[in-house]
Each structure stands twice: as structure tokens, then as C-alpha cells.
């Protein structure tokens, strides 16, 4: 059986095709001219060069160099990759401005932004920002040197400890600053005026985008655009519901057999049961205040100069106020690679991660001590203690499973089942049979209906979302 949910390959291929066709149009001379002229309307100076576009997972950037030595970039969400382009841009702009005003985290300075209708040639919603000069990103500084560009990134096992702690320490300071930004509800920020923001839109998460793009979840199943959450249990209940919705609606590659479907269904029902019982949070934090959380805060978005000093943190599109348990979980990216993709499996990742986590917590405590001595942090605001506890208790894995829909199955059976439901006598693949008695008769009957539905879908492979939904 599959250890994790696979992406819908039909949706993946269509997503890639839409992206490729759109990017191809960017290289036309008229398009490049329109983009260059548009940048010049919002960044004064004598232009020197419009560089070739650079594409990331969700965006394409054009950089224009100026005679004064500075540069500006214009960034567009990629159709086919970004399911909520207008919402994504608005959320990111407001969050960047909020972080800029309330922390010393080096974020891009926004020159201008706008909707698709306001963009050159209607290419899409956009942000124009001052370019942050850098020589590498944090991944470049941490990665195993002999890996090729096609390899998935893995932390250099022989990295110098002094270098590692220098880099970890700077990120620790950023996480500390973000943890001090407290908000009254769970959701995305909207700027009201120059000094006022409100949490008045749904949390636009990385998972929200991918559930639609590669999990083919119908958009009406997501929280509505103006929906926010007043408690951590309410939000975690919604995430648990979405895990089950994902299994139900993903058209292709969701399961590989009837028993695989039952195994996935039982895991999601048990996870939802735990969420509804309030097993994942504590009463003292349930009603907030809530912390700023960025799903995409990872090394490739942290920019460094030649002295390995952080000069910029970019890509804040999937950032929102979240349960404190999210920020109390230690960063997953300390090894660069995600646990579900680790070559030797989840347990090997866990063992390797534990040793690097101790490096991170050491420098985090050092940063906390400095901040407390300077009077800008209280002892009860430390992150190191809750991070250590999250890892030791296994809460790290609860939050990871809640947030990462495609990794859910691997995490649930290896890290959560035994913790919450006790030891089992069967193999991991067969353990669902021991847990099925925990379901009600109605839930077991519904499971068989879902199994029948999923097995009936295996004969044909169709695209379950309309391409024009990405516009």
C-alpha cells in the first residue's frame, strides 16, 4: 500500500501544461516590452537591463537593473500553479507590510501591486518590489555539495557546526520575532489603513492551494473567503474535515486498492475523532492569541550575503494567524528535506532530525537569552521550551499531519496511531483492521460507500477541475 497520498497525475499534467503555455508567452518581444515599461512607471531611474524571467513553484519574476545600482522585480503568480492568484497577492502584500512595520525581519519593499486587470497585457495580479541583493539562499549554504540540481535537497551531513549554528541562529531570531506578533483570530490579515490590520479572511494556506490543484477538491468545500476561526479546535476540526474531503473527492491516484481506501478512511476518521475531542490543543491557548505562521518559510526563501548574513526573507503568500501549536512545533526544514520524502524513510528522518534539532534549540536559547537581557522578550515568551516539548510529546507530528494533506497517511500510522490508540499486534499496513471497531456503524457503512465510489473511478482518468478556474 502507498505510504502517502499521491498527487492526481491528470491534474498535475494539466497544471504543468497551463504553466508552460503561459510562460512561453512571456518571451514574446511585445510582452517583454510591456513588462519593462510597466516597471518603469513605478520605479524611477535609468534602466540598464531587463533580465530573463525566473520561475519558482508558484511565481515568475522579472528583474530590471538600473543605472543607480539598484533593481526592481515584478512578480506574477503562475496560472496552473496558483489556484487563488488575486487572493494570494493581496494576502502577501498585507502580510509583508505588517511584518515590516512590526519586526526587523528584512522583507522586500513593495513599490506597487495590483490585480490582473491592472497588469501589463492582463498577465495576472502582480507585485513590484525592490530587489534584495544577495549571493545565495539558505539552501545553497546548507545543502550537500555533491547533489545535482535535479536531486532533492538534503542537509550536508559534514557541515561545520559553527557555520550551522550561525545560520540556524539567524533564523531563530526571525521565528522569535514572528512569535511575538499576536492576533485575535485565525485567518489572513487585511490592511485597513496605514496602521491597522484585521484578521478578516480565511487562512490561505499552502495546503488550500494544493488540495484544489493536485487533490482536485471542489472549491466550495474549502472555508469561504470571509471565514475566520475564533478557536484553535475549530480550525483543527476544519483541517481534519478537509483530510476526509480530500480522500473523497480526489479523482485519480487517491487509492490503489479497496483495502488501501479503507486504511486511509479509518486514519482520517480517527484523526477527526481526536480533533473533535480537543486532543490536539490545550484550554489555555484554544482562544488565542494566535501567532503568525508562514507555510512557506523555508531555506530557499531566506537570502544571504557573502558573509552568510540574512539580508532578506521572501515569499510570504501562505502566511496567516494560526494556532500557537503551529509555531510551537520546531521547524521541519532543519534537514532541508521533508520527512515523507526522506530516502531511508520516516524513522531515519526522525533520528537524523533529532540531532540537528538540538543544534537549533541551542542557538534558539542563546537568542532568547540575548532578547531577555535586552528587555524585548519575556521568559514566558521563549520558543525553545514549547518546541522541545512539541517534539518530545509528538505534537510536532500532529501539526504536521494536520497541515500536510499528502503526507497524512505516512505520519498517522507511524507517529499518531500508537500514541493515541495504543499498541497494535498487526503490521502497519494491516493496523486499520484493528482500529475499525473504533468507528460507529454509520461510519463503517459510509466507508464501504466511499470504497465503492473510489473503485468505480479507476476505470477512467479525467480532470476533476476546470482549467478556467485558475484565472
Image (cartoon, rainbow, N blue to C red):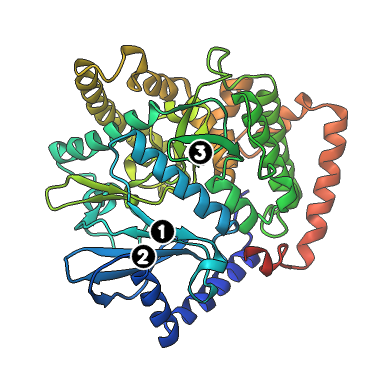
Q: Position of residue 100 (x, y in %)?
A: 34, 41
The image quadrant that residue 292 belongs to is top left
Whether residue 280 is situated above or below residue 36 in the rendered picture: above
Look at the numbered discs 2 and 1 and tell me whether their residues touch, using CB distance below 8 Å: yes
Tell me which residue sits at (76%, 30%) in the image: 436
Mark 3 surroundings: few (<14), some (14-19) or many (≥20) residues within 10 A: many
Dot in front, 2 or 3: 2
Tell me which residue sits at (21%, 23%) in the image: 366
Whether residue 45 is situated above or below residue 353 in the rendered picture: below
Residue 42, which numbered label?
Answer: 2
Asked whether residue 297 is in view, the answer is yes
What residue is disc 1 on? Answer: 112
The answer to whether residue 25 is left or right of residue 355 is right
Q: Position of residue 101 (x, y in %)?
A: 35, 37
The image quadrant that residue 279 belongs to is top right
Asked whether residue 79 is in view, the answer is no
Tell me which residue sits at (34%, 51%) in the image: 301
Q: Position of residue 105 (x, y in %)?
A: 29, 39
- Give the CA distance from mark 2 to mark 3: 28 Å
The image quadrant that residue 200 belongs to is top right
Mark 2 surroundings: few (<14), some (14-19) or many (≥20) residues within 10 A: some
Q: Nearer the viewer, residue 48 or 205?
A: 48
Mark 1 surroundings: few (<14), some (14-19) or many (≥20) residues within 10 A: some
- Give the CA distance from mark 2 to mark 1: 7 Å
What residue is disc 3 on? Answer: 320
Quadrant in the picture for the C terminus: bottom right
Amino acid at each position: 500500500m502507498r505510504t502517502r497520498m499521491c498527487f492526481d497525475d491528470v491534474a498535475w499534467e494539466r497544471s504543468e501544461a497551463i504553466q508552460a503555455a503561459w510562460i512561453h508567452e512571456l518571451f514574446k518581444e511585445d510582452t517583454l516590452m510591456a513588462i519593462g515599461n510597466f516597471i518603469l512607471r513605478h520605479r524611477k531611474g535609468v534602466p540598464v537591463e531587463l533580465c530573463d524571467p525566473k520561475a519558482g513553484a508558484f511565481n515568475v519574476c522579472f528583474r530590471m537593473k538600473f543605472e543607480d545600482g539598484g533593481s526592481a522585480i515584478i512578480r506574477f503568480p503562475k496560472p496552473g500553479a496558483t489556484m487563488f492568484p488575486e487572493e494570494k497577492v493581496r494576502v502577501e502584500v498585507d502580510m509583508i507590510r505588517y511584518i515590516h512595520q512590526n519586526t526587523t525581519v528584512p522583507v522586500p519593499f513593495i513599490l506597487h501591486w495590483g490585480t490582473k486587470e491592472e497588469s501589463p497585457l492582463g498577465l495576472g495580479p502582480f507585485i513590484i518590489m525592490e530587489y534584495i541583493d544577495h549571493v545565495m539562499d539558505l539552501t545553497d549554504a546548507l545543502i550537500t555539495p555533491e547533489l545535482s540540481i535535479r536531486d532533492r535537497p538534503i542537509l550536508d551531513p559534514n557541515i561545520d557546526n559553527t557555520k550551522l549554528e550561525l545560520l540556524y541562529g539567524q533564523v531563530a531570531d526571525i521565528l522569535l520575532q514572528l512569535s511575538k506578533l499576536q492576533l485575535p483570530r485565525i485567518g489572513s490579515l487585511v490592511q485597513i489603513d496605514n496602521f491597522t490590520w484585521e484578521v478578516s479572511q480565511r487562512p490561505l494556506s499552502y495546503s488550500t492551494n494544493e488540495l484544489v490543484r493536485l487533490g482536485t477538491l471542489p472549491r466550495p468545500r474549502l472555508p469561504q473567503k470571509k471565514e475566520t476561526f475564533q478557536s484553535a479546535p475549530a480550525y483543527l476540526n476544519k483541517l481534519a474535515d478537509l483530510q476526509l474531503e480530500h480522500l473523497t473527492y480526489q479523482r485519480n491516484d487517491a487509492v490503489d486498492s479497496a483495502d488501501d481506501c479503507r486504511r486511509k478512511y479509518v486514519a482520517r476518521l480517527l484523526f477527526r475523532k481526536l480533533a473533535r475531542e480537543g486532543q490536539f490543543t490545550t484550554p489555555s491557548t484554544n482562544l488565542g492569541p494566535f501567532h503568525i505562521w508562514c507555510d512557506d518559510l523555508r531555506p530557499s526563501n531566506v537570502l544571504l550575503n557573502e558573509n552568510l548574513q540574512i539580508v532578506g526573507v521572501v515569499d510570504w503568500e501562505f502566511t496567516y494567524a494560526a494556532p500557537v501549536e503551529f509555531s510551537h512545533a520546531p521547524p521541519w526544514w532543519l534537514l532541508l528535506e521533508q520527512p515523507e520524502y526522506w530516502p531511508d524513510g520516516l524513522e531515519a528522518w526522525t533520528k537524523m532530525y533529532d540531532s540537528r534539532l538540538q543544534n537549533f534549540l541551542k542557538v534558539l536559547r542563546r537568542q532568547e537569552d540575548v532578547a531577555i537581557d535586552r528587555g524585548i522578550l519575556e521568559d514566558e515568551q521563549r520558543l525553545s521550551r514549547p518546541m522541545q516539548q512539541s517534539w518530545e510529546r509528538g505534537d510536532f507530528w500532529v501539526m504536521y499531519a494536520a497541515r500536510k494533506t499528502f503526507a497524512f497517511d505516512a505520519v498517522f500510522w507511524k507517529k499518531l496511531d500508537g500514541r493515541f490508540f495504543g499498541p497494535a499486534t498487526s503490521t502497519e499496513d494491516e493496523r486499520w483492521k484493528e482500529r475499525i471497531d473504533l468507528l460507529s456503524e454509520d461510519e463503517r457503512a459510509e466507508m464501504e460507500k466511499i470504497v465503492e465510489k473510489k473503485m468505480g473511478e479507476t476505470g477512467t482518468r479525467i480532470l476533476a477541475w476546470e482549467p478556467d478556474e485558475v484565472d
